[in-house]
Amino acid sequence: MTDLGKVDRDFFTEYIYPHLGASRDDVTLGPTHGVDFGVLDIGGTAVALATDPLSVLPELGFDRAGRFALDIVLSDVAVSGLDPSHLAISFTLPPEMTDDQFAELWTAMHDEADDLGVSIATGHTARYSGCSYPWVGGATALAVGDHDDLIRPDGARPGDDVLVTKGPGVETTGLLTTLFPEGFDDLDPTVLATAQDRLDETDAVRDAMTVSAAGGRNVHAMHDATEGGLYGALNEIANSAGVQLEIDTSSIPFRPGVREVCDFLDIDPWHSTTAGTLVIATDPSVTDDVLAALSSRGTPVGVAGTVVDGDGVVVDGERVEHPDVDPAWDAYDRLAGGAVE
């Protein structure tokens, strides 16, 4: 098991996957390594659901922190092709959080949920000793719809185009420079300000909804590139579908400030968490429609490659593996400790 971040495939396969409680026929997609959500069949209706820890970062301001936290939670069901619809949320708040701070956080989360059409159905809110920022609870998001409209991360097919939005390292760049600006004193101030703007691009929910609306059932797979970055997400799509992805990095967007920050931190942007970046497999018949819909939202996107028979991921002619360990965690620790080597 990795020291920080999500468990690796070996740990998942040995300890988690064989022990999933009772077997039920209404679970049509259960826990799968690298797959963002599960699926229930309720009377013929599909319910996609995903659970995530709730990360609240006071340094962002509680309004911005609330929106950031909610979008991260909802993204895992948004990539199902069904619009997020319901949320169950549990807060285990640190004692130092004031009522006014929580009110600001909660109002921001309500406003974002309302704008997305998501109803908060149930929850739990309490302060507990021993709790601390940023991990202050957890949430389960649901999306309800037709089984035929589901987009599964393991659905990529030979002949599909592979689309990538925004590119590598977006979340790592925006989050670390915003949380620890003093750690980047040696970086050009203009570059730092540009890098901090990347934090506003970590919302994948609206892009995922746009993709499913534009491409419909000809979108075969969609995945949010979080821990392990783009190389991790590409491998997870390939491995789950039993196909090979052939990728040309020159066709993938690279957002301003990402290269400079990752070079400064001596980390690989392709391995670093990049919430907000989507990897999408589409039938070529709808690729142009999806590209146009994303572009109309102002979302950078490129046709990064194709799906072929085989296995794994080939990038610029060379096979790449899942990084397993995300370097952003170590960079966070170094910055939080006040030292960047």
Image: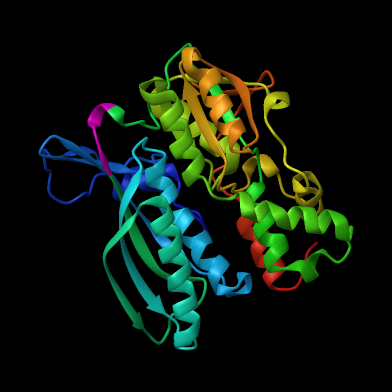
User: Can the viewer see residue 187?
Assistant: no
Question: What number of labels is visible?
Answer: 0
Pick the residue in front: 261 or 99. Answer: 99
Span shown in magenta: 144-148
State the residue at coordinates (57%, 25%): 291
Please give left or right for residue 65 compared with residue 241 in the image.
right
Residue 263 on image: x %, y %: 80, 48
User: In the image, residue 301 lies at what x, y percent?
Assistant: 63, 31
- Quarter of the figure with the C terminus: bottom right
Residue 183 rendering spot, x and y as whole percentages: 78, 67
Residue 67 in view here: yes
Left or right, 49 with respect to 71, comes to left
Q: Residue at x 33, y 40 (%)?
A: 32
The spot of residue 259 in percent (x, y) is 78, 44
Q: Which colour scheme is used?
A: rainbow
- 59 vs 322, nearest the viewer: 59
- Using the rendered view, name the quadrant where residue 324 is placed: top right
> Is 120 in the magenta?
no
Frontmost residue, 79 versus 18: 79
Residue in the image at 48% along x and 73% along y: 105
User: From the viewer's perspective, is residue 274 above or below residue 215?
Assistant: below
Q: Quadrant of residue 268?
A: top right
- Residue at 63% from the left image edge and 54% from the top image edge: 200
Q: In which quarter of the image is residue 34?
A: top left
Specify whether 60 is left or right of 286.
right
Using the image as rendered, state which of residue 323 and residue 173 is in the foreground.
Answer: 173
